[in-house]
Image: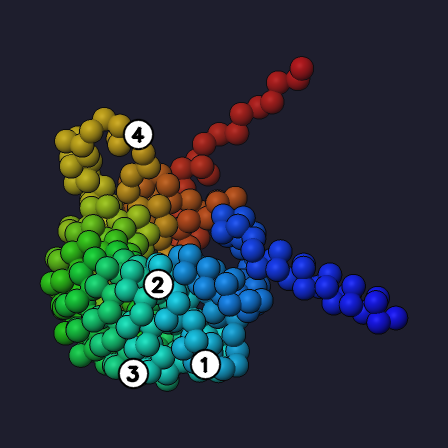
């Protein structure tokens, strides 16, 4: 009996040593097939695994952690030296605090992609920490972080000048004219911005933004009730690479905005003539548009927009022109609807 126990004990010890001594390349190959939660569990098998896994990780999401997130992040941050992408989005009750964000900023200096969305307990100290710690950020999601102010957002834009994707949806207190002007002045490489559910966004702020960010491809103005045609006209005239625009619930929109977008297609074609031939065959112009509940728009203006941008589809197979709540626009159709169906010849 004792011999059997010794054999079992020795066998377990030998297996444990073999796992501990596994080659680095093989260990990271195994880790690449794990989900984020399992990766963290695996890092707890032994100190070597923890050091190796944490030092080699480049992307991780801790959104699955619903308890003691601050404690988990504080224990991991000093070892995540190569981290480039981090998701700390909260699914339920907000847990993350400013001290934890500062600890991450002090240790993970190469971060380029950060998601702090739905962390309503965070305040401007977090924005200050991320601005100082991650000047190379290219993607930032702070949607539904209601504790931030426009001063904090202004400071972030002054330090994180390489931002290309910025999600500010639901940051109503922070997104003001002052903040949008700072973004336009500093973040000249910006390609995508989400300003949905930000009621303080107005035409003056949008103009300051688009004049400074001509490379915008994706813009979300959903539920920005204060903006008018002037915002869309400025966007159409200055952002010639616009591909996706959300105007959901922007009830001040009229046909002027639609015709401005349609005319931008003509202007953009003139620009494309001077680009290398290789790029001319790619899809050009607006490819996604949401004008739901923009009730002042008429079929004539929206149909003109469809003619200018063939990639806008109303057909059920691939809808990219969304018009919910617009009963006057039921007659608008895309190019697919006007093409006759070819008869199928019998074999």
Pick the residue in front: 127 or 25: 25
Tell me the element at label 1.
Answer: helix
Q: Nearer the viewer, mark 3 or mark 4?
A: 3
Q: First in sequence: mark 1 or mark 4?
A: 1
Q: Nearer the viewer, mark 1 or mark 2?
A: 2
Q: Calculate the distance from the C-alpha at mark 1 to the C-alpha at mark 4.
A: 52 Å
- Residue 325: image quadrant is bottom left
Q: Residue at the spot x=17%, y=52% of the render?
A: 214
Q: Calculate the distance from the C-alpha at mark 2 to the C-alpha at mark 4.
A: 42 Å
Q: Which residue is label 4 attached to?
A: 281
Tell me the element at label 3.
Answer: loop
Q: Calculate the distance from the C-alpha at mark 3 to the C-alpha at mark 4.
A: 46 Å
Q: Residues within 10 Å of mark 1 (few under 14, many from 20)?
A: few
Q: Residue at the spot x=81%, y=69% of the render?
A: 5
Pick the residue in front: 18 or 63: 18
Q: Is residue 48 above or below residue 278?
A: below
- Label number found at residue 123: 3
């Amino acid at each position: 009996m004792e011999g059997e126990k010794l054999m079992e004990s020795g066998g377990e010890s030998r297996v444990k040593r073999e796992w501990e001594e596994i080659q680095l390349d093989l260990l990271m190959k195994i880790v690449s097939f794990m989900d984020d939660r399992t990766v963290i569990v695996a890092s707890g098998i032994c100190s070597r695994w923890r050091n190796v896994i944490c030092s080699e990780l480049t992307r991780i999401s801790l959104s699955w952690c619903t308890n003691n997130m601050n404690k988990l992040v504080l224990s991991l941050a000093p070892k995540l030296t190569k981290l480039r992408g981090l998701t700390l989005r909260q699914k339920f009750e907000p847990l993350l605090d400013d001290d934890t964000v500062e600890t991450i900023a002090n240790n993970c200096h190469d971060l380029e992609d950060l998601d702090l969305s739905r962390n309503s307990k965070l305040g401007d100290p977090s924005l200050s920490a991320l601005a100082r710690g991650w000047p190379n950020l290219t993607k930032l999601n702070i949607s539904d972080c209601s504790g931030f102010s426009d001063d904090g957002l202004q400071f972030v834009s002054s330090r994180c000048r390489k931002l290309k994707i910025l999600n500010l949806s639901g940051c109503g207190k922070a997104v003001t004219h002052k903040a949008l002007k700072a973004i336009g002045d500093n973040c000249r490489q910006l390609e995508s911005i989400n300003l949905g559910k930000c009621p303080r966004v107005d035409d003056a702020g949008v103009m300051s933004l688009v004049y400074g960010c001509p490379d915008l491809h994706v813009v979300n103005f959903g539920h920005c009730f204060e903006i008018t045609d002037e915002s869309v006209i400025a966007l159409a005239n200055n952002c010639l690479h616009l591909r996706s625009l959300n105007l959901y619930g922007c009830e001040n929109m009229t046909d002027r905005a639609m015709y401005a977008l349609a005319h931008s297609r003509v202007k953009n074609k003139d620009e494309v003539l001077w680009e290398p031939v290789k790029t001319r065959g790619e899809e050009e112009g607006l490819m996604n548009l949401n004008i739901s509940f923009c009730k002042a728009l008429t079929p004539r203006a929206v149909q003109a927009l469809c003619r200018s941008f063939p990639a806008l589809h109303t057909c059920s197979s691939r809808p990219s022109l969304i018009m919910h709540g617009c009963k006057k626009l039921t007659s608008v159709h895309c190019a697919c609807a006007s093409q006759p169906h070819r008869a199928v010849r019998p074999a």
